[in-house]
Image (cartoon, coloured by chain):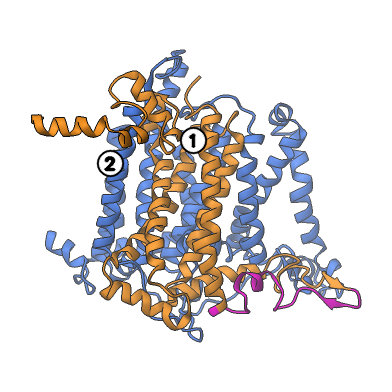
Amino acid sequence: MPQPLHSVLEYIRSSQPWNSIFRHGIPRDRRTRVMAIMSNVFLHLHPVAVRKSGIRLSFTWCMGGLTFFLFLAETISGVLLMFYYRPVPEYAYSDIIGLRAHVTLGLLREIHRWGAHAMIIAIWLHMMRVFLTGSYKPPREFNWGVGVILLVITMLLSFTGYLLPWDQLAIWAITVGSNMGKATPFLGMGGPFSDVLQLPGGVPLVTTRSDAAYLLLAGTSVGENALMRFYVLHCIALPLAAATLIAVHFWRVRKDGGISGPL
Amino acid sequence: MLASLLSLASDAGPSPISHPAIDAFKNFVNAVSVPEISLPLFTIGFVLMMVGYRWWTKPSVATLLLLLFCLFYFGSMLIDPNYRLIIKKPDNVPITMMLLSVGLCLWVAFRQAALNDQRIEKGLPLPDADKDDKVLVWPDLVYTELICLVLATALLVLWSVLLRAPLESPANPAGPPNPSKAPWYFLGLQEMLVYFDPWMAGVILPGLIITGLIATPYIDTNPKGNGYYTVKQRPFALSVWLFGFLILWVVLIVFGTFLRGPNWNFFGPYEYWDPYLQVPLTNINLSDYFWVFALGKPLPASPILREIVGIIFVSAWVLVLPPVLAHTVMRRLYQSMGAVRFYVMAFHLVIMALLPLKMVLRWVFTLKYFVYLPEFNLNL
């Protein structure tokens, strides 16, 4: 390195701001490498040392990490899309067209959509890997359950996002999906025993305007209320739930002994 | 060849290659694609996969299988315009990615399982067992993660630049497309609607998939196969789970996407989706079989009496079959698991088996419902 540049870097590294951010030297030896992981809030999700066989690509396929990466990519691209998109039937479709036609970085919608599909595939493969390596076995039983809930949330995230472009694909796919809600036993109008829940005097509790599908759609069909409901679920409720459970999931990976391996 | 591949990207595409031999091939594939032939074939393939995993995971065999699959899957785009339309539909692109990646991952898993099982048989330790091979996360893991992150970002951006995200005409609440399909990852559930009512296919079965998955670690008491790939040490767990994932989930998604056309009628992969195709509705309820065909009587007026055979059958399937299993073919399993674990497992297992059972009865006896109680919206 040229001498002037070297001395500038030296000056920065010895300055008070630098040392207030990084409380260790450059990670060159064992002590500083351990410090690099332990003193960083993001990196300290990791243990300081792992089994080499545990992080081999042929063992983990990196699918859990890829799912998390895609979650971050979806979050970032999704927040940027929220600046532009309006979740009302009058504008939703034209905003999507606008993203494609004349918005700088409108490619974000492509990234967001394909990333969502990729995330579904990645989380299935992650689950398959964990199953085939028997990694759900003690002591990791609980974390497998957390992972199953995360799988469901991921698919619900994709399902709610499916409606937002407000095209034919969107409303009819959601219609097919939410029709299932109508068939919920006891709670859906079209489901078994829908007339069992009654108030005294024979007043039915479950009607087309109070059943499980109505709860989901805020209406009897997929309309503007459903769009708003799915928008809030997609952008706020489900991502918060996912982020919380991801934190639990990662924490438990460490607490349960790290990545599994032969005993 | 390159020109024809490139022209696939255009909307019109090349004119399909036509030849008597190709037509015969297409007719053959269309004929064996019907669920009553192809699903048993997939199941046979699944059994062969589980039994012959030491053979097909050899790199040479696996490469050949991959080439054959790609030749069939992508080559078919050259010989049939209907097939090309389905594969190229933007919303179906992820399914191609899923099929390829699931296949690749299966190979990686079963290959290592074959090698591990070989070592176990010879009494050798597993390659990584008892090794104190710890490495520091910085730099070994952090850099791997960085490389994965950069590669994934590049691939995602490249994918997004090359292929536009699906977008169809504006929503029209008065004009449902035919067929109306759920998002692709739920199409396995929609395919189940052929055999079950929505309360079963859309609510009960998905619910039991979730509870069954969460219960898995608590009902699988086999301590072996924790942290490494193996088939031999846990054949039952792997067979049940992979049958559920590969056949009842992935294959049914392929059915729902590629082989279900207007009015959810079945079409072979190379068939035109004719919206006016008439399919006779010939399915018959169990109650009709029993009262009308077997006894020659009219259906009784009382709904419970009318459906009594179906009610007894389904109750026996869910309530009697598990204890029978516990004391016959699964006695050892029952003893090693204990009653609670066994019955949780057996309950999920018999409900899961209800789907293939209903399929077979539908194909062989055109059975519509075991229990037909429209009085309570309860059809099974």
**Residue most toward the bottom?**
B174
**Residue most toward the front?**
A16
Vertical order, A194 against B117 (above or below): below
Residue B61 occupies quadrant: top left
Secondary structure under badge 1?
Answer: helix
Question: Can residue A32 be seen?
Answer: yes
Name the residue that disc number 2 marks: B64
Which chain wears blue?
Answer: B
Residue A218 within the segment the image draws in magenta: yes
The stretch in magenta equals A200-224
Q: Please tell me the numbered disc located at residue A132.
A: 1
Could you tell whether B347 is left or right of B227 in the image?
Answer: right
Secondary structure under badge 2?
Answer: helix
Amino acid type shown at disc 1: Leu
Q: Chain of mark 1?
A: A
Q: Residue at 75% of width from left, 30% of height from top? A: B338
